[in-house]
Amino acid sequence: MSQSVKVIYNNKEFEYQLIEGTMGDIAFDISNLRSDTGLITLDVGYKNTGATKSDITFLDGELGKLEHRGYTIEDLAGKASFVGVIYLLLYGELPNKNKLEEFQNKIKAKSGVNKSLEVIFNSFPQSTHPMALLASLTNALCAFESDEFKTNEEMDDVIITLLAQFPVIASWAFKKTKGLPVNYYDTNLDYVSNIYQLLFSEGNEVELDTDVIEALNKLLILHADHEQNCSTSTVRMVGSSHAGLFTSVAAGVSALWGPRHGGANQAVIEMLEKIKADGGDSQKWINKAKDKNDNFRLMGFGHRVYKNFDPRAKIIKNAVEIILNKLNIQDEVVDIAKKLEQAALEDEYFIKRKLYPNVDFYSGIIYKALGINNEMFTVMFALGRLPGWIAQWKEMRLEDQPIGRPRQVYTGYATRPYVALEDRK
Ligand code: SDX
């Protein structure tokens, strides 16, 4: 196979080297394209453009494969702890028992959220969307914790601080929707059990049902990282200006909120409940999704990269059965979801466009079964994605990558003379 790509322009030939990834993905490096040829590329939405090399996550959209640092998502979701996956994403290896305990203890030591943050929290109305609150309080951390660093050790301290305090403020977003008092990190509990107690304790000791904690552990792992998705690219972009970690992640929270991205899990449940209220005719809604004159889209379906089943959707779908049976919950929207999925997978429109269920299609059903309200689903996504955002930000900073600054093709007015106010029509 040729090791380069040739561009012929203005009767000159320019050669660009191929870069082959560990798993066979191939790119050609156009770092010198503009200086060589005066040309830039145009790729709206970056559908064909690699923003970086990365050692963290590999996904194959055609095969529906996802791996973190070489471990398959199936192995990690089935066998690992979320805090172990956090360690893996950040440091490149699964931790042994000592390192895992040391890591958890470091998190516990940094988990004390400044009480003054609660004053800011109390100033928000109960109607505040949890994602707005999460983005705001993540930025507000800068007022109480420094995210400045000069050494890698200091960078690690900043990272541990965010890992410790983000779940606390995420749980506050849930408490705000309920008008309930907030909780603080319980250093007697492990990371995932803490997330559960932060969300559900009401001054009492909550029952930590092992199946529920296991379902939460699995869901958080399944959301942990996904290479250069919209919110992660946002975190990298903001971080590339050398803005701090907290504010870079706050920007990622904002990007994740959109219904085309992480906000889809809330939109899926709202769609399923709307279809249920409308009589449950899944074919009617499939037809709406196919109708170009109807702006309805089948939320939880389709993906920029996966042109096959999202492997995370398969794992979550299996977990739905287990957790609903365990909690003895019958939820009609599960049947509607399955009918929608079946109908779509047999429909030429979806088959031709390779539209399959993605991570968001079934996740909301589990969150709902755990007692989490619809508006909080994307906060739960953010709780899972936090280590991915941080690991990608860390990789970008350690490589001292240049500030992100894409080019454009200008299509506005050509140069024209100024028109004084009195001369304007
Ligand atoms: C996440 O990038 C990541 O990795 C994201 C994520 C992560 O872990 O970070 O995996 C998480 O964001 C998952 C995606 C969640 N979003 C949704 O479920 C929202 C519904 N899906 C879509 O809006 C859409 O599929 C996107 C945004 C996910 C992907 O959009 P693309 O890649 O820009 O594709 P497109 O909009 O160009 O669609 C291609 C065609 C179009 O039809 P034609 O113009 O070719 O006729 O497919 C159609 C679209 O109309 N299409 C859909 C559809 N998704 C795409 N038609 C109906 N229903 C849908 N859901």
Image (cartoon, rainbow, N blue to C red):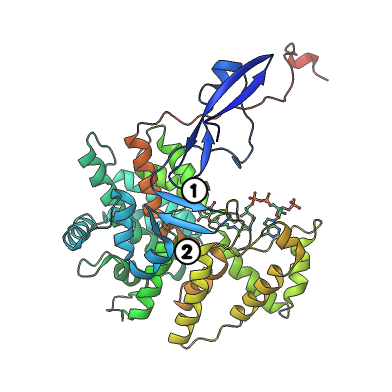
In the image, is the residue at mark 1 within 8 Å of ligand 1 by its beta carbon?
yes
Residue in the foreground of this view, choosing between 274 and 217: 217
Tag 2, which secondary structure? loop
Residue 338: mark: none
Residue in the foreground of this view, choosing between 134 and 155: 155
Q: Amino acid at mark 1?
A: Ser
- Residue projecting furthest to the top: 417
Which image quarter holds the C terminus? top right
Mark 2 → mark 1, Cα distance in angstroms: 26 Å
Residue positioned 59% across, 70% down in the render: 269
* Lateral position of residue 272 relative to residue 115, left or right: right
Residue positioned 77% across, 61% down in the render: 290
Residue positioned 18% across, 62% down in the render: 101
Residue positioned 17% across, 58% down in the render: 102
Residue 231: mark: 1
> Picture coordinates of residue 231 (x, y %)?
49, 48
- Residue projecting furthest to the bottom: 328
Residue in the foreground of this view, choosing between 309 and 214: 309
Q: Which residue is mark 2?
A: 126
* Lateral position of residue 95 relative to residue 42, left or right: left
Q: Amino acid at mark 2?
A: Gln
Residue count near mark 1 (Cα–Cα under 10 Å), binned few <14, some 14–19, many ≥20: many
> Picture coordinates of residue 240 (x, y %)?
41, 34
> Picture coordinates of residue 182 (x, y %)?
34, 66
Tag 1, which secondary structure? helix
* Lateral position of residue 192 relative to residue 300, left or right: left
